[in-house]
Image (tube, rainbow, N blue to C red):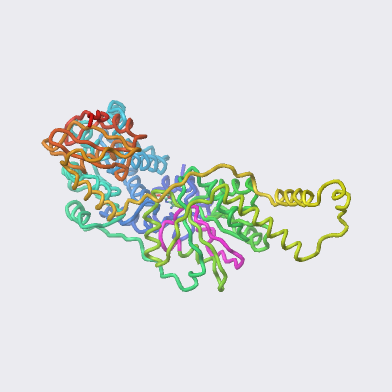
Amino acid sequence: MVASTAEYPNVTERSGGFADLALHPELTRALVELGYEEPTPIQRAAVPPSLAGRDVVGQAATGTGKTAAFALPLLHHLAGAERGSAPRALVLVPTRELAAQVCEALQNYGRHLGTRVVPIYGGQPMGGQLRQLERGADVVVATPGRALDHLTRKSLRLDELRVVVLDEADEMLDMGFAEDIDTILGRTPDERQTLLFSATMPPKIAGLVRRYLREPERIELSRAESVTGEAALIRQTAYVVPRGHKPAALGRVLDMEAPTAAVVFCRTRDEVDRLTETMNARGYRAEALHGGMDQHQRDRVVGRLRAATADLVVATDVAARGLDIDQLTHVVNYDVPSAPDVYVHRIGRVGRAGREGSAITLAEPREHRMVGTIERVTGQRIAVENLPTVADLRARRWERTRAALREALLADSLDDEVDIDSLVAEFDAVRVARAAVKLAHEAGGGVADEEELPEARLDPRGGAGRERRNGSREGSRGGRTAKPPADDMTRLFVSLGRTAGVRPQDLVGAIAGESPLRGKDVGAIEIADRFSLVDVPRAAADDVITALRDSSIKGRKVTVRRERRRAR
Ligand code: AMP
């Protein structure tokens, strides 16, 4: 069934919405169900040329909506094509985490098209993957190492491919997958469409583009208009929060800030609804504002915020368009916005007319690049801070109670009719005061918030940082065992070394591609003639051993185990 436009009048009829992209109706329907209201900038730019069959190079990091930017056109193309047993699209990604995510996104967007998406990455038994591939796949999402394994076994066919996507291409090259990518692409049909996404565009990406893409459309996220002087009055802060802790983190931050009136921006309608409920349960008067509501409902919500009968509005960008409230003190980005202009536009709603305002962003560790890009484009610093602790919050609440009591005392409007004489006759006056202050403090509200939230940091993988790390590895390559591993690291023995042509990047690539670790987690590497030693975080050592046992490095099986320490 195709969704009628009348059912979702605010989304499908608006210009600039998904309707403009003229995607297969079953895709548009899935997007409506997922609560997406409009395309992100990278989607708006990349989808039309991809739909037209052109090759595309998109510079976009995690958090911009880049997955849908290639997934939607890919699914659109496949929807109209005949189904065979060989896959018609291949998405190459650097890590198994990303493979799982991309797979889930494709399945979500393609839910009404019945598209068969098969992930193939290391750390999973080969048997299941072989059976799935045998049954038939429309799209294969793979890490290069595993894709090559299947090619060697002839369990993966590339001759019917129509679309190839290279996602996070810079990461793949940094992890040493260049040769694997060459081999894989060399076996795909010449007339394929190729889409390449990369957060950075170093020269080696240009090389890849030259070799494998044909007159591609090049897309960079637009530069935001520069922020005017008024922005100086806006305090800009980011907190790094793993996804699962975001609702609690938002509560904690708002409890600390005690905004007079705030807007919290979310990506989807469902998130707006969920978060409104959470915040109401936490004692806020929160209202939802999204594109599924009619104008009358929206006006009512805005009216409540203006009249201070609501403290919080939880909104999507679409619904908040034109929202203009002088009293607004805080803008919260529940996720990092999908482009710098979106950020600038959102935070421009506070700090009007010389007032002070706060812009707060909750970023997931992997959204590190978008925070950096926004800072660069706006020329404004965003202070990355640790979440307030339970103790911070308690202290702040007491501060507020104290301030309220001082105000009451200074105003000298205390009610003489309150009879405290009988209490003072029975108890010490200071104790009476203590009890009264305690009750006043408790009445000040706020739910008990006892859960310490984990401290997280922005994932610091940046181009320069990576090169430095690789450089230091180069330095230790082939050397003798130097220092023992750090306390939190375990040294693994890998049965291949220099004579097998193993380089540090091959080991990093295999570990990051096949195990839950990312390249940056891998510590010192030493390559001897017949073996290598790699330091990995102690907690992940078993996972790495299991994952590498199932895979191959430089086309050869390896033995991996903990290094047996020699007596020194
Ligand atoms: P990505 O940059 O592809 O990792 O996507 C970041 C997040 O944005 C994912 O959680 C997506 O589900 C979400 N997302 C992507 N496109 C949209 C959209 N047009 N509207 C709302 N959310 C989106």
The residue at the far left in this view is: 499
Q: How many marks?
A: 0
Q: Percent x, y for residue 159?
A: 19, 39
For the C terminus, give its image quadrant: top left
In the displayed structure, 248 sits above or below 300; it is above
| Residue in the foreground of this view, choosing between 192 and 262 | 262
Residue under the image location 17 percent in, 33 percent down: 531
In the displayed structure, 19 sits above or below 277; it is below
Is residue 140 among the parts visible in the rendering? no
Residue under the image location 60 percent in, 59 percent down: 259
Instruction: Please check the rendered image and state whether residue 325 is part of the magenta-colored stretch, yes or no.
Output: yes
Magenta stretch, residue numbers: 316-343
Position of 212 with respect to 394 (left or right) is: left
Position of 189 with respect to 200 (left or right) is: left
In the displayed structure, 119 sits above or below 36; it is above
Instruction: Please check the rendered image and state whether residue 294 is part of the magenta-colored stretch, yes or no.
Output: no
Is residue 320 among the parts visible in the rendering? yes
Q: Percent x, y for residue 414?
A: 81, 61
| Residue in the foreground of this view, choosing between 433 and 328 | 433
